[in-house]
Amino acid sequence: MRALDHGRQSFQKQAWAAAFSQLSTADSESPLDPEDLAQLAQAALLIGRESDGVELLTRAHQGFLSQGNVQSAARCAFWLGFTLLLAGESAKASGWLSRSGRLLDDQPDCVEKGYLLLPVGYRAFHTGDTETARATMARAAAVGERFADKDLAALGLQGQGRALIRQGEITKGLALLDEAMVAVMAGDVSPLNAGGVYCSVLDACGEIFDLQRAQEWTSALEKWCASQPDLVPYRGHCLVRRAELLQLHGEWPDALEWAERANEWLSSPAAKALRGEAIYQMGEVHRLRGKFAEADDAYQQASQCCFTSGPGLAQLRLAQGQVEAARIAIDQLLVMVQAPGPRARVLDAYVEIALAENNLAAARAGADELSQIATRQGIPFLHALSGRALGAVLLAENNARAAVGELRQSWTIWLQLEAPYEAARTQVLIALACRRLGEEENARHELTAARQQFQTLGAEADVSRVDLLLDRGNSAGPLTTRELEVLKLVASGITNRAIAGKLHISEKTVARHLSNIFTKLDLTTRTAATAYAYAHNLI
């Protein structure tokens, strides 16, 4: 009895490792009753022992059945199914959820029936049926309210909020998420469910780039995890989201450290998808710092863990001068990524790659779609992305005056968001627009400021590019006008035959121009010529 009493006390104190150890000891001395087995199962899940948690929930389920406590048995069956569903074991999950529903068929109205709505809403949300998800989660929340079950009410609110955000009802959705978080912060929600609400809210903030909320709730999750040192499941999620924020704010060494810690923490098979996000984040930091080999390796590892909606690999290929590979990668993402927030990031990269290929029509289409998303969502981050993309397209269309206006607005928002790298990237485009307008002094001022920021951040590739621009590296050098045209088309990745068709000259003439380019620039391959064109801002 002593181990049992200590285990119950440890559970109440949220000392999960002690509770698991003490309750396990009590169970070995004399089999626990179903209520204590359910607590032992929760402790197991909270310290990352998923298989033990599933086994213990199974025993609790059987124990409740033997007592004739059908509703409690059905609740255990539900949690077994929901736990397995989140772990990706859909067949087993379906079996347990089906059993839970069957047990409740002959039962009067009860809160357990409300819990069975959650996986229905979960599946609908992840298959894109946001209206079914919203309505189902609203019903679940109502059941929670009716039976004064704060766990179910909070889970229903967060699910409803996530669905509304996907439908573009961002203000309403965020209000429901905030309401769910009020219950969590008040300690009204059990730890297993509180952690789930925290992570879902952070995912929603990331989806719509609500950086202020993300910062606030990430800090809250850190404190919550720190108050329970034994806690395992939600700590990795916190580490990944913190790494994302640190990267945006230009604290790259810290961002890399947090991403690496998340990668180490998320070692269980159940955490494979989130581990992929952590590795992807490592790749992002490496790419921004110009460590392309390390970035490439990280992106490849991340893709083996999960599908990543971020355009990092496509942006890496562009930075490496592999324009065609960049276009193929971004085209694939554009088909697969449809949620507005993630798609905006993809469109941002798509516009940049289309401009690199000199495909103004595609760049304009991408910028217009990005602008539509930003207008619908009303999120500052998206307006900053949209303004920069539109400014780059206007610049390519030789409308430098309009480009400056869009780019200045974008730059101002990046400063307000405390996103120094994005601000510096935008400042380079402002400089190019100024140069196009003949305002060389202003151009050099913008470039100097951008270079200083890049150097502070450790963005080596960007420093080199700005150095070339400051040295008037955007000139064609020894090339003739026709050779410059050929070089630009080579850098876009098309063949000699295609170049001949565009310029209305013969393939033999194209080959002669290419030979002259190689000789004048001391180059030997098309890849080297492409890299030269990018380095000297000829694209």
Image (spheres, rainbow, N blue to C red):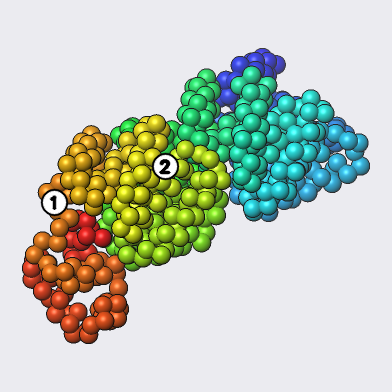
Q: Of 262 and 420, which appears nearest the observer? A: 420
Residue at (42%, 42%) from the top-left corner? Answer: 384
Q: Of 63 and 294, which appears nearest the observer? A: 294
Residue 279 % position (x, y) = 40, 45
In-image side of 98 versus 19 (left or right): right
Report the amino acid beneath label 1. Answer: Arg
Which type of secondary structure does the marked residue at label 1 adopt?
loop
- How crowded pointer 2 is (Cα within 10 Å; few <14, some 14-19, many 20+) is rated as many
Residue at (86%, 41%) from the top-left corner? Answer: 104
> Could you give the CA–CA distance between mark 2 and mark 1, rounded to whole angstroms?
28 Å
Q: Give the position of the C terminus as an image quadrant.
A: bottom left
Report the amino acid beneath label 2. Answer: Ala
Residue labelled with disc 1: 472
Q: Earlier in the sequence, mark 2 or mark 1?
A: 2
Q: Of 175 and 10, which appears nearest the observer? A: 175
Residue 528 % position (x, y) = 18, 64
- How crowded pointer 1 is (Cα within 10 Å; few <14, some 14-19, many 20+) is rated as some
- Quadrant location of residue 35? top right
Residue at (24%, 70%) from the top-left corner? Answer: 490
In-image side of 18 versus 144 (left or right): left
- Residue 384 is marked as 2
